[in-house]
Image (cartoon, coloured by chain):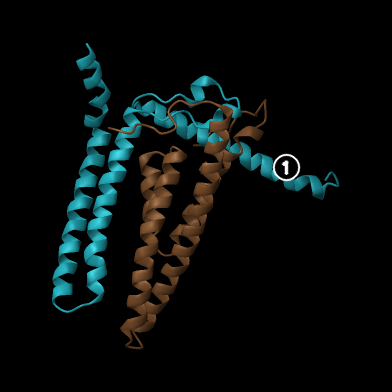
Chain colours: A cyan, B brown
Amino acid sequence: MSGSAEASRWRFLITPRWLAWHALVILIVVGMGWLGYWQLRRAEAGNALSWAYTFEWPLFAIFTVVFWAKTVRDEIHPPAPVSWQEEAGLPAGARQRGGAGEADGEDDGDLIAYNAYLARLAKEVRGHGRWHGLG
Amino acid sequence: MAGGTASGNGHGPDERTKEVRRVRLNVTLYRLMAYVTGVVLIVLCVLAIMQAFVNDEAAVSVVGQIHGGLYIVYLLVAFSLCRRLRLPPGPTVVVLLAGTIPVMTFIVERWVSHRYIEPALAGGTAAPNPPVPERRS
């Protein structure tokens, strides 16, 4: 019921792609923690510059965790559709974000690439008008 | 997660213009930070190379700390922009790491502008009957 619905919303977190991301996050955090500890030892040995990095590495580790948490949260609770896309009058399907479907991501990629292509076309045309005496 | 999305599902035109303004501000901040962080990183690299010939650690350590501080701000601004533009995790990581590789911020900034920022902000001016896109192989 509501419990299983809740569970299925979180299920994307155990797909291979997301497991790889989790592993990367853990690796980065452990690595940064180790680098911070290494700098702490250097700072204690008398390297003044290392004091800055002693605090910077753990800060980056915290950033990594926060960014990861926000990404997961965005995936579970997709934010409201981007407003300018509504203004552009895109078809509803173009801006709907599913939970975590990989196909969604690819659709978005195609859509973004297509939009970029349109923007490029518009830019090229804008420049040409003047050359042909149309501007 | 407490807080939820601040913008919620507010679709009012007021909310829209606010969001567009926020994105524009974020884009401006991102470009500024990408440029400044990139320039400082290049300066840092030049100094580090010079250090091999002239033994003077002071300049490198000062510029190194400046870059460290700027990179923290760059991370916050860039991640915020990546979220607003709904970048997938992969490209987001590329954007964030760009601040640590010399010259990379400039390249990535151009790529993000072409691929994500321009399409997003040009959304309102897209052609009503766009041509069929080329298939990319």
Residue A18's spot in the image, x, y percent?
26, 35
Q: Quick check: B24 above or below A81?
A: below
Q: In which quarter of the image is the N terminus of chain A?
A: top left
Q: What residue type is labelled 1?
A: Val
Q: Quick check: A21 above or below A97?
A: below
Horizontal side of A21 relative to B50 (left or right) equals left
Q: Is mark 1 on a helix, strand or loop?
A: helix
Badge 1: residue crowd in 10 Å (few <14, some 14–19, many ≥20)? few
Residue A39's spot in the image, x, y percent?
19, 68
Q: Name the residue located 16 percent from the left edge and 68 percent from the top edge.
A: A40
Which residue corresponds to mark 1?
A125
Between B81 and A98, the one lying in front of the other is B81
The answer to whether residue A84 is seen in the rendering is no
Between A118 and B41, the one lying in front of the other is B41
Chain to which mark 1 belongs: A
Extreme-right residue of the structure: A133
Horizontal side of A127 relative to B83 (left or right) equals right
The answer to whether residue A80 is seen in the rendering is yes
Q: Name the residue located 26 percent from the left edge and 56 percent from the top edge.
A: A59
Q: Name the residue located 24 percent from the left edge and 53 percent from the top edge.
A: A61
Horizontal side of B80 relative to A125 (left or right) equals left
Residue A67's spot in the image, x, y percent?
31, 44
Horizontal side of B15 relative to A21 (left or right) equals right
Q: Quick check: B36 above or below A133?
A: below
Extreme-top residue of the structure: A1
Q: How many marks?
A: 1
Residue A32's spot in the image, x, y percent?
21, 57
